[in-house]
Amino acid sequence: MAQSLPMLFMLVALVAMWFFMSRSQKKQQQERKNLLENMKAGDRVVTIGGLHGVLSEVNTDKSTVVIDCEGIFLEFDRAAIRTVTPGTGASVATEIEPADVVDETKADDTKE
């Protein structure tokens, strides 16, 4: 009985390690599944290949997404998305007004 006690402790330790590792792995898989299911147009994404872009559309039937990469639209499988950052909504283009131009030569002449 005394000889089997250390082996029993090792077996219990191995089972506990296996349980916690599999639990952690299942939790990560569930988080990834939620991430991919909650993607919507306007979210910023990075693919597993390192491509950065904005989601243009999500097709749940074909399990694909269309990514806008600076005007170039590319279609990817949903599983190819590594990270998703929620977007702030549609970006609105605003017209930029020119700043007042100051003639520096006149300003320099007055200092002399």
Image (tube, rainbow, N blue to C red):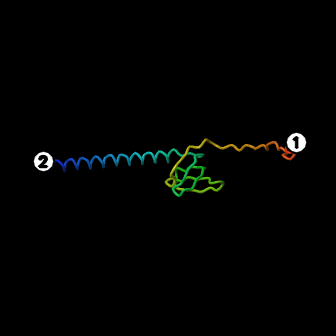
Q: Name the amino acid type tagged 2.
A: Ala
Q: How many marks?
A: 2
Q: Percent position (x, y) of residue 14?
A: 26, 50
What residue is at 52 percent from the left and 52 percent from the top?
81
Q: Residue at x 65, y 54 (%)?
A: 70
On screen, residue 77 above or below 20: below
Name the residue carrying label 2.
2
Q: Of callouts 1 and 2, which one flags the residue occurring earlier in the amino acid sequence?
A: 2
Q: Quadrant of residue 106?
A: top right
Q: As rendered, which of 5 and 50 lies closer to the eye?
A: 5
Cα gap from disc 1 to disc 2, whole angstroms: 101 Å
Q: Spot the residue most to the front.
A: 112
Relative placement, left or right, of 75 versus 95 is: left
Taking the spot 66% from the left edge, 54% from the top edge, the residue there is 71
Q: Nearer the viewer, residue 103 or 22?
A: 103
Observer-nearest residue: 9 or 106? Answer: 106
Q: Which residue is mark 1?
A: 110
Q: Nearer the viewer, residue 88 or 61?
A: 88
Please name which of the two marks, 1 or 2, marks the residue nearer to the observer.
1
Q: Amino acid at mark 1?
A: Thr
Instruction: Report if the CB atoms under discs 1 and 2 are less than 8 Å apart.
Output: no
Q: Position of residue 84 (x, y in %)?
A: 53, 47
Q: Give the SS element for disc 2.
A: loop
Left or right of residue 20: residue 66 = right
- Quadrant placement of the C terminus: top right
Question: Is disc 1 placed on a helix, strand or loop?
Answer: helix
Q: Position of residue 78 (x, y in %)?
A: 51, 53
Q: Position of residue 102 (x, y in %)?
A: 83, 43
